[in-house]
C-alpha cells in the first residue's frame, strides 16, 4: 500500500514555512558550469546589517539543522543559508567532491547575491567548508565559527583508534544511514542523551525522504574528506575563530577541537559545551546561540571565563 502521509515531508514543509516567516526566501543560482546552488536569502537585504552565512553538515537539508536559529539571527543579520552540493536542491554534474570545491561554489553563490563580506558559521561537515572558505577567501570572511568539525583530522587517525569506527566505509554506513538500525546508531553517536523509542516507521520515512537521493555522491564527499588528509597541509586561517564543541562528541572526538586550537594558537578560542554530543545545534541550541551572539554581535571580552554550563579554553 502506498504511503499517504510522510512525517518527514510534513516537517520539511513546516521548516520551509518557518524560514519564510523569518524573512527568508528560497533562491536558486545557476553557476553556469553544471552547478546549481540553492540558498535561503533575505527577502530584503538591509545594508546596515552584517551578513551571516550558515553552513549545514551531513544529514538533512539546511533547514533541518538551522531552523532554531533563523528567527533570532535574522533580527541581527542578513542571513544566508545554502544547501551544499548534493543536499536539498543543490547539485553539480562536475566530478569535484572536496570541501574546497564546495566552498568555491558557496562563495560564487554569495557573490551572485551581491555579498562580498560576511561572518561564517559551519557545523560538522559544514565546518570543513567554512574553514576552506575562510582560507581561500580571507578578504570576504571576517569571522569564523567552527562547530564540531574535525578539520584537523588526519588519514592515519582512523587506524590510530581515534574514532569509534574502524574504516571510512563503516563511518559512511552510519553517517549516511540507509536502514533504521544504522540511523539509530547515528542518533546514539550524535547525542549525549539519545532519543529513545523512535518507531522504525518514522526512521524509514526519514531515510526515504532525506537519505536516499544522491547517496553515491555523498559517499564521495566523505571519502574526499579523509583521503590523504594531513594536518601539515591544513592552512592557518587568519580570521578570529570560535571553535565550539560537545564535550562528549563521538563523531569528531574532542581531541580534534584541541588539535585545531593548537593549530590556530592565539587566533582561536575554544568553547566546550558540557553534557553535549555532536549535535550541539539540537542538544544545546540556547547555549550555542548565546556563544554565537557573544562572538559575532557583542563585544568580545579580553579574557574567557568558565561558567556552569560550558568551559572555555584560551
Image (spheres, helix red, strand yellow):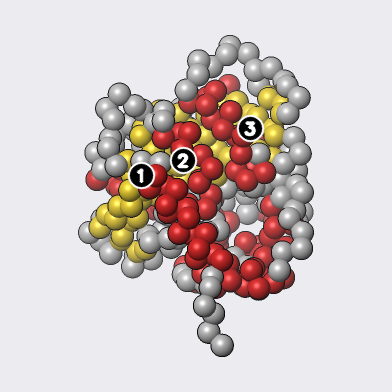
| On-image quarter of the N terminus | bottom right
Disc 1 versus disc 3: distance between alpha carbons? 24 Å
Circles 1 and 2 in contact, beta carbons < 8 Å:
yes
Viewer-closest of 167 and 10: 10
Disc 1 versus disc 2: distance between alpha carbons? 9 Å
Disc 3 versus disc 2: distance between alpha carbons? 15 Å
**Is residue 299 found left or right of 29 in the rendered image?**
right
**Which residue position holds label 1?**
24
**Which residue position holds label 3?**
287
Residue 151 shows in the view: no
| On-image quarter of the C terminus | top right
The relative height of residue 132 versus residue 266 in the rendered view (above or below) is below
Residue at the spot 71% in from the left edge and 68% down from the top edge: 199
**Which residue position holds label 2?**
70
Which residue of the protein is positioned furthest toward the top in this rendering? 302
**Is residue 15 found left or right of 140 in the rendered image?**
right
Judge the density around disc 1: few (<14), some (14-19), many (≥20) Cα neighbours within 10 Å: many
Amino acid at each position: 500500500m502506498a504511503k499517504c502521509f510522510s512525517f518527514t515531508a510534513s516537517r520539511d514543509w513546516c521548516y520551509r514555512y518557518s524560514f519564510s516567516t523569518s524573512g527568508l526566501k528560497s533562491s536558486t543560482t545557476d553557476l553556469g558550469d553544471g552547478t546549481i546552488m540553492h540558498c535561503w536569502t533575505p527577502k530584503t537585504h538591509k545594508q546596515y546589517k552584517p551578513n551571516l552565512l550558515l553552513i549545514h553538515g551531513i544529514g538533512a537539508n539546511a533547514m533541518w539543522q538551522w531552523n532554531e536559529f533563523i528567527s533570532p539571527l535574522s533580527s541581527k543579520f542578513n542571513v544566508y543559508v545554502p544547501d551544499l552540493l548534493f543536499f536539498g536542491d543543490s547539485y553539480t554534474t562536475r566530478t569535484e567532491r572536496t570541501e574546497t570545491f564546495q566552498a568555491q561554489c558557496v562563495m560564487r553563490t554569495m557573490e551572485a547575491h551581491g555579498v562580498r563580506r560576511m561572518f561564517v558559521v559551519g557545523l560538522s561537515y559544514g565546518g570543513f567548508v567554512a574553514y576552506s572558505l575562510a582560507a581561500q577567501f580571507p578578504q570576504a570572511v571576517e569571522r569564523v565559527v567552527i562547530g564540531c568539525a574535525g578539520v584537523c583530522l588526519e588519514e592515519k587517525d582512523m587506524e590510530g583508534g581515534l574514532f569509534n569506527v574502524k574504516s571510512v566505509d563503516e563511518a559512511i554506513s552510519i553517517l549516511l544511514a540507509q536502514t533504521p538500525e544504522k540511523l539509530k546508531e547515528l542518533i546514539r553517536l550524535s547525542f549525549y542523551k539519545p532519543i529513545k523509542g523512535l518507531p522504525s516507521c518514522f526512521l524509514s520515512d526519514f531515510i526515504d525522504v532525506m537519505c536516499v537521493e544522491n547517496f553515491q555522491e555523498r559517499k564521495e564527499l566523505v571519502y574526499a574528506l579523509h583521503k590523504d588528509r594531513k594536518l601539515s597541509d591544513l592552512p592557518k586561517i587568519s580570521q578570529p575563530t570560535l571553535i565550539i564543541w560537545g564535550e562528549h562528541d563521538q563523531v569528531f572526538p574532542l581531541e580534534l577541537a584541541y588539535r585545531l586550537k593548537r593549530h590556530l594558537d592565539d587566533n582561536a578560542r575554544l568553547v566546550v559545551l558540557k553534557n553535549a554530543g555532536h549535535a550541539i545545534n539540537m542538544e544545546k541550541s540556547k547555549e550555542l546561540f548565546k556563544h554565537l551572539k557573544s562572538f559575532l554581535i557583542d563585544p568580545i571580552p579580553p579574557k574567557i571565563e568558565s561558567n556552569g554550563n560550558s568551559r572555555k579554553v584560551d
